[in-house]
């Protein structure tokens, strides 16, 4: 494991402070995770604002969140030209996807997926909302004897030219207790959980977006 730290190409100092995958000062690969059934069927528009569907249209419901970080390798060197695709549930934990079987209210003003291309510094940024949690159909996890559910999370796939796409999902440290019971996270080690968890700075008031930092080490 390489010990080189982020020395150049930093977006801001806060990007380092929030580096979720810099574990003990090292850039450690994010554990992969399956895309699940809600992966976009088509490549999303090159759009990083998920908080509304149309320019100047009505805003999605929910706590606004700025989600940002860097796509880097294990030497902490940034990947420019990396394609970052995200998809997530709305505030009510419902996806906008043909495979979504749950019948709850679905926010018509939320853009459920986005895409961003990193620049020279490997940085990405999305403007979105904090996703809701949701129950998982009974197929999951009888061994625990619990109703399976998903803690709030954002799925992502990163494609670097010449490499296989990398897929995983990120969680949020403000749900520390909830995360322990998540269907994906409960099977992970403490270290793996840490590598999959974004660090969140809550805003001074709820009209401002919270800021989540998650560096994607591939
Ligand atoms: Fe999900």
Image (cartoon, rainbow, N blue to C red):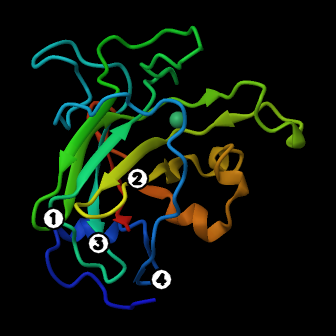
Residue 166: which quarter of the image? bottom left
* Residue toward you, 60 or 116: 116
Q: Nearer the viewer, residue 210 or 188?
A: 188
Residue named by callout 2: 200
Label 4 vs 2, first from the N-terminus: 4
Is residue 186 shown above or below 19? above
Measured as percent of width and height from the top left, residue 168 is found at 47, 52
Residue at 19% across / 31% down in the picture?
45
The numbered mark, 3 or 1, whose residue comes first in the sequence reads 3
Q: Earlier in the sequence, mark 4 or mark 1?
A: 4
The residue shown at (59%, 39%) is: 151
Closer to the eye: label 4 or 2: 4
**Nearest the camera: 187 or 200?**
187
Q: Which circle's residue, 2 or 1, is located before the other in the chain?
A: 1
Q: Which residue lies at the image location 60% right of the left edge and 52% below the top edge?
A: 176
Q: Which mark is residue 80?
A: 1
Measure how far apart labels 2 and 3 are at the Cα level. 13 Å
> Quick check: 15 above or below 152?
below
Question: Residue 83 appears at what percent x and percent y?
Answer: 23, 51
């Amino acid at each position: 494991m390489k010990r080189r730290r982020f020395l150049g190409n930093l977006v801001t100092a806060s990007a380092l402070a929030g580096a979720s995958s810099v574990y003990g000062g090292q850039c450690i690969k994010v554990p992969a995770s399956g895309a699940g059934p809600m992966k976009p069927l088509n490549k999303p528009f090159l759009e990083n604002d998920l908080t509304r569907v149309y320019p100047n249209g009505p805003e999605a419901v929910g706590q606004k969140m700025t989600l940002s970080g860097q796509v880097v390798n294990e030497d902490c060197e940034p990947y420019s030209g990396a394609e970052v695709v995200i998809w997530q549930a709305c505030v009510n934990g419902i996806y906008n996807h043909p495979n979504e079987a749950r019948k709850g209210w679905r926010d018509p003003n939320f853009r459920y997926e986005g895409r961003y291309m990193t620049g020279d510094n490997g940085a990405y940024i999305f403007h979105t909302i904090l996703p809701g949690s949701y129950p998982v159909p009974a197929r999951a996890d009888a061994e625990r004897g619990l109703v399976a559910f998903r803690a709030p999370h954002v799925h992502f796939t990163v494609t670097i030219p010449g490499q296989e796409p990398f897929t995983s999902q990120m969680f949020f440290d403000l749900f520390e207790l909830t995360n322990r019971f998540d269907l994906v996270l409960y099977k992970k080690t403490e270290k793996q959980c840490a590598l999959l968890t974004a660090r969140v700075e809550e805003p001074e008031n709820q009209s401002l977006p919270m800021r989540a930092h998650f560096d994607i080490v591939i």
